[in-house]
Amino acid sequence: MKSRLKELTSRSNGWGHAKRKQKLKEYIKGWVGYYHLANMKRLLLETDEWLRRRIRMCIWKSWKRVKTKVANLIRCGISKHKAYEWGNTRKGYWRIADSYILHRAITKEHLCRAGYATLMGAYLEWYPK
């Protein structure tokens, strides 16, 4: 499952956000639909954290230029000084995706509102409690 999610969230596949969301939604719904009988809450919670980091990495890469990164961080509620500091950093995409700045800018709620599917959300459709 993780290797397939890694393929779907590859930052070099050239897909836009809409296609990535759709493919993730299809795969997650199918995977959870097949394995929903197993007791796997812990696995899904941990995998969701990892998947959100992968999505943040894709979003960070899609912003490309420093000017765009700074502007989008400010738009997400980060102070100008911190946005400039993190927008100009040379750290890798994966490392930045786990930073507290990106966690504050692109929260779990932002990703849900944007339409990204979660494993736990799909699991709770089968077991609403």
Image: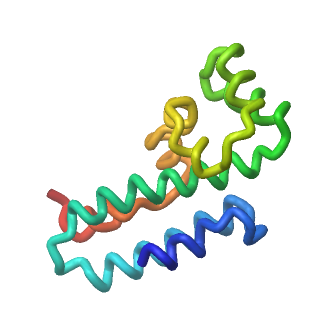
Q: Is residue 46 above or below residue 36?
A: above
In screen coordinates, is 9 left or right of 128?
A: right
Determine the image quadrant of residue 77. top right
Q: In front: 115, or 42?
A: 42
Q: Is residue 123 above or below residue 64?
A: below
Q: x, y percentage for residue 54?
A: 55, 57
Q: x, y percentage for residue 25?
A: 50, 69
Determine the image quadrant of residue 18. bottom right
Q: x, y percentage for residue 30?
A: 41, 81
Q: Is residue 36 above or below residue 44?
A: below
Let me know if residue 121 appears in the view.
Answer: no
Residue drawn 31% across the image and 85% down it: 34
Q: In front: 112, or 91?
A: 91
Furthest-bottom residue in this view: 34
Residue drawn 30% across the image and 57% down it: 45
In screen coordinates, is 122 left or right of 18?
A: left
In screen coordinates, is 88 left or right of 117?
A: right
Quadrant of the snapshot with the C terminus? bottom left
Q: In front: 20, or 10?
A: 10
Residue drawn 51% across the image and 43% down it: 98
Label tally:
0
Residue drawn 48% across the image and 53% down it: 52
Q: x, y percentage for residue 78?
A: 61, 21
